Every structure is written in structure tokens, then in C-alpha cells.
Image (cartoon, helix red, strand yellow):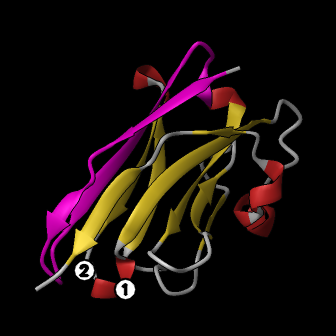
Amino acid sequence: QVQLVESGGGSVRPGESLMLACRGSGRTLSHYATAWFRQAPGKAREAVAGIGLSTSSTAYLGSVEGRFTISRDSGSNTVYLLMNSLKVEDTGVYYCAAVHDPRQTVAGATLLDPSLYHTWGQGTLVTVSS
């Protein structure tokens, strides 16, 4: 199984940007569909963005589309989440998750289904506040 470690969280002001990284170890992350989820205090976890084995297959939560970009770098075994124009409501703990997908069946909207993911990182906190 791949192990996942997130980094890049922090405290920013509305309108600023952050880049989160999810680094895989133990296995090649390029063989895994990978997604970012977040959980705000007192709220349910929600899917933010996902990327399939084909980097052209991505999916986003509606409220972040056009502001967030998910990408993968095979060389560093890392999946990134670039977050621009951050809003107060983007505050939360961000988790990355992965599922081994050799047949590339996880694509499109299914990338945002948390029940598919069996490997999770420990999370990184993002705080957006003025």
C-alpha cells in the first residue's frame, strides 16, 4: 500500500494562494487515483478535487472550480492542489486519499466519491482569515 503525507497548509488571508502537496511513499502514486478532501469544524467531510491515472481526468467541487487545480508529478511521486483566490469558507483540514486503480476505472465524477478511497493521509490545516 502507498503511504500518503500532506504538506503545505498554513494561515492566509482571503484572496491569497496556497499549494498543498501529497507525497506518496512505498508505491508509485501514478498507479493510484488520488483526491483531496476537506473537513471544516463542525461540518462533514467533502471532496474537493480528484485526479485519475490519466491527468486529463479531473473533477472538482463546484465551489472551487476555476480557483483550485489538481495535478500530479510522477517524478516526485506527488499530487498537488493549487488553491488560488482562497475564501474564508475554504478553511479546514485537507486530506489526500488514494485508491489503486490499474484499470483506470475511477474517473470523472467518481473521483469525488470518498467510499472508493482506502488510503488516507493525516491531513494539513488550511486557515483563511482576515
Q: Residue at x 76, y 40 (%)?
A: 118
For disc 1, the marked residue is: 89
Q: Is residue 14 left or right of residue 48?
A: left
Q: Nearer the viewer, mark 2 or mark 1?
A: 1
Q: Is residue 72 above or below residue 124?
A: above
Task: Give the amino acid type for the residue marked by disc 2 in the picture.
Answer: Ser
Q: Is residue 3 above or below residue 48?
A: above
Quarter holding residue 83: bottom left
* Helix, strand or loop status at disc 2: loop
Q: Residue at x 47, y 49 (%)?
A: 71
| Coordinates of residue 125 in the picture (x, y in percent) | 33, 57
Which region shows up in magenta?
Answer: 2-29
Residue 3: in magenta span: yes
Q: Quadrant of the C terminus?
A: bottom left
Q: Is residue 18 left or right of residue 59?
A: left
Task: Give the amino acid type for the residue marked by disc 1 in the picture.
Answer: Glu
Name the one closer to the observer, 61 or 108.
61
| Coordinates of residue 39 in the picture (x, y in percent) | 51, 68
Label 2: few (<14), some or many (≥20) within 10 Å?
A: some
Q: Is residue 122 above or below residue 5?
A: below
